[in-house]
Image (spheres, rainbow, N blue to C red):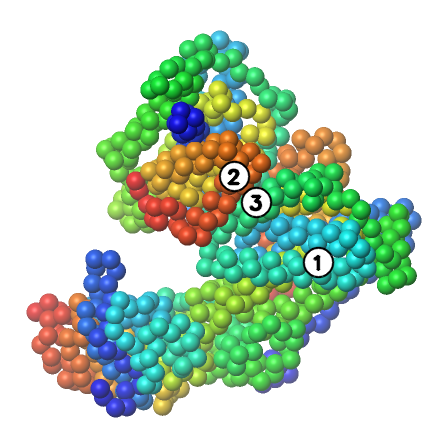
Amino acid sequence: MTPHEHSYFQPSTRWNRWEIAFWLAWAAAYFIPGTNLPLLTHILVWGLFAMSLDLILGYRGIASLGHAAFFGIGAYAAGFLAKFGWTEPLSGLLLAGITAGLTGLLTGRIVRGLHGVALLMVTLGLNMMLYDAAQRATDITGGDDGLQGVALAPVLGLFRFDMYGHTAYWYVLTVAFVLLVLARALVRSPFGLALRGARENPLRMLTLGAPIERDAILAFGLSAAGAGIAGALLTQTTQFVAPEVLAFQRSADVLTMLVIGGLGRLYGGFIGALVFVLLHDTVAALDPIYWYFWIGLLLVFIVTFFRQGILNTLDKLLASRRGEAV
Amino acid sequence: MAVIATMLFNGLAYGVLLFSMAVGLALTMGMMRFVNLAQVSLAMTGGYLVVVAMPHFGLPYLATLPLCFVLVALLTMLLERWVFRHFYGADDLTQVLLTIGLLFMSVAGAAYLFGPSFRPMQVPDWLSGQVPLLGLMLDRSRLFLVGAGATLALALFLGLERTRFGAMVRACVDNPRAAGACGLNTSMVFALTFAVGGGLAGLGGGLAVTQLVIDPNFPLRYLVYVLIVVSLGGTGTVIGTLLASVLIGIVDVAGKYYMPQAGSSLLYLITVVIMLWRPNGLLQRKGMP
Amino acid sequence: MTPGAILRTEGLRMAFGGLSIFKNLDFSLQAGYRHAIVGPNGAGKSTFVHLLTGLLRPSGGRVVLDGRDITHATPQQRVQGGLVRTFQLNTLFPALPPLEAAVLALCQREHLGGLSLRSLARRPRQIEEAWSLLERFGLASEARRPTGLLSYGQQRLLEVALAYALRPQVLLLDEPAAGLSTAQGHALFEQLATLTAGTTLLFIEHDMNLVFRYADRVSVFAGGDVIAEGTPTEVRSNDLARKAYLGH
């Protein structure tokens, strides 16, 4: 075996220059005068949310229409912890992630064996039920006015959440980076390969002796935990949480972001979030109703010409320029 | 007792609307495995046709209904030819995204053309008020719906079972490849089925004007209901869609009456439970009738 | 019961609703043999393989592998027990290159597919074995291209290679030469014969030349029953078998 053959998996394991540039750009953005830090923080939170969906949809191929449920569970978990005195942010974040993750494991177990329409309907139904419940239990959740009394202690005891969003920005950026590193390692491991195999052909995986159900449930749990952490970050940095974090519209939005950016790339979620949030910010300011037109058109456009999303399409272009087969 | 009976009746009327809007989706999903979420936008189009054409052209309500069917069917045929048929082989997610995009655009389009608020409807005299029947006081408009629904269901059933075109449709739902191999012009059958399904949705929208609010957000409000009907009823089956529509209609009306604080959650709970128990729909099959 | 039978069925019954496929099927596969199953279409051959491998559950009867009752074992458990199959239609991973598919199969064999953060690059043994596997099947030159882009013949080879990678005790091949030209079919079987010396082989085939050349034993399935069994020569001269195939 030649060294060339031996190192088949190494190029994807090493950090390539685009990834490094990506994270440096986010770090550098802080120092550019006049940047809208809260907006950028918002983009990072959504990017993380979309990345968590990528794990289950892009890598494992399971379509869930209710991912906002896990985002919301994490958001509310962080909110309740802070409200009732557990104001330490990092541990609160972790607990919120674990709560969402456990719910994800349970959901994965419930929907195992479902495909297509049934899967979409059950995930959608569960999301809707949770949203309904959160809206109606106004004494617990505060309803649309939001949970009252959410206050966070300084991060690591040193960095107070200031009103310009400085701490929030670095907090979210660091957490997003850490989670990306973990997700990256996961998808490049044999487990990640098994997920992709199950996406491509579950029957073959079965006849290779693979525990596809167990793997899918685990993936669901991890994906939910990621979404929950994203939700918790939103609560912690805005000191606010309302039932709209659970709305079906959020599930649809995050799916759109991921499709725009490209499935199965991890970074696709971030790129998609960037495009979506910037577009929303620009257009919705004009007239909310026009937003529906443009996002609808964008979806039709993407699906017709760039079905693979931005990153995968770019990849294909670059590969064909290099003369490789795609 | 009278309350329950009236409620069942109202649920049945609501179910007729859901059936009309959903049956096209069930057929196209069963036949060419095409998930057309924009189906509800077609219903909205029918609704707007009635509320706009009636005052504008001075047409009586009954005359606008066939118009709804025909015009929306034509519109659907164009959509099928220009857009949908290019995505027949695509995966579910792609079709969902495409048709959701079209749905969003229809919402914006309706707001642009007709304004963001709802169009009030002049209910014709013969549909207003109530009629004593079987010891109950029943709304005339709902009676009309139930009658229209029964006629529609019968017409569909006879059309599928007794006509040659119906036989072709059934063959294509059962096994499009084999049907094509037998010499059936599947392309034409697909196009016409799409058109009829769309026309029925438009008709449903037209029928809905006496019951539901016609505004730009109509598709967003009723998309979930239509999806629930199709998944519970099973794809490709008219009887399944009918059963599911009536079931959902009754459950929703009853739920909102007895448990207003639970809202639509009862419906979602039932959907989740039934989907886990019967993933292929209540009738556990994917075919005609 | 025959000693040395590594895989057998006892009184196997299979019915779908009112349709009965097998009524009382006794079948015995000897260890180390190359055993062919032949028969007209609709005789239940593929259904039989589905029952053996756990994709279908029988309505009655038993399946025994190496002395262990596996009638209610999951497909994965049967694979762990050494029973591996291929499919008549290519059942592969279109987006994954053959090398990744091979590494995937090998990781599953070694139970390395659990939750982990260790990169595939740190699994040199599996990578090396994957390369030599592909070389043995003549797929090394295509190892990096997505499987979906390979020719049909190459895909067919990969179909068998992935099963072979699991080091099975019993290898079930459902029409391995399906869709291949006569020459390709013979080349495939020749390769298999060399590679699987010592492994028990059960294969469904339609090409009688391949059967006569490579099988030690033949079972003729027709109408849900084994109507003839023996060496290829014995079966060739069997009247019942001829009737089932040729109608006279």
Q: Nearer the viewer, residue C170 or C214?
A: C170
Q: Is residue A162 left or right of residue C239?
A: right
**Residue C151 seen in the figure:** no
Which residue in the protein does label 2 denote? B224
Q: Residue furthest front?
A: B1
- List the residue tagged with mark 1: A96
Residue A87 lies left or right of residue A67; in this view the side is right
Distance CA(mark 1)–CA(mark 2): 30 Å
Q: Amino acid at mark 2?
A: Val
Q: Earlier in the sequence, mark 3 or mark 1?
A: 1
B192 over A310 or under it: above or below = above
Q: Residue at x 26, y 67 (%)?
A: C59
Q: Nearer the viewer, mark 3 or mark 2?
A: 3
The N terminus of chain A appears in which quarter of the rendering? bottom right
On what subunit does the disc labeled 2 rest?
B
The chain under label 3 reads A
Q: Is residue A97 above or below residue C137?
A: above
Give the residue at x 63% y 22%: B117
* Label ID, residue A129: 3
Element type at marker 2? helix
Name the residue nearer the viewer: A195 or C78: C78
Q: Where in the figure is residue B142, as x and y percent of width and height?
A: 42, 21
Q: Is residue C153 at least partly visible in the picture?
A: yes
Mark 3 → mark 2, Cα distance in angstroms: 13 Å
Residue A160: image tag: none
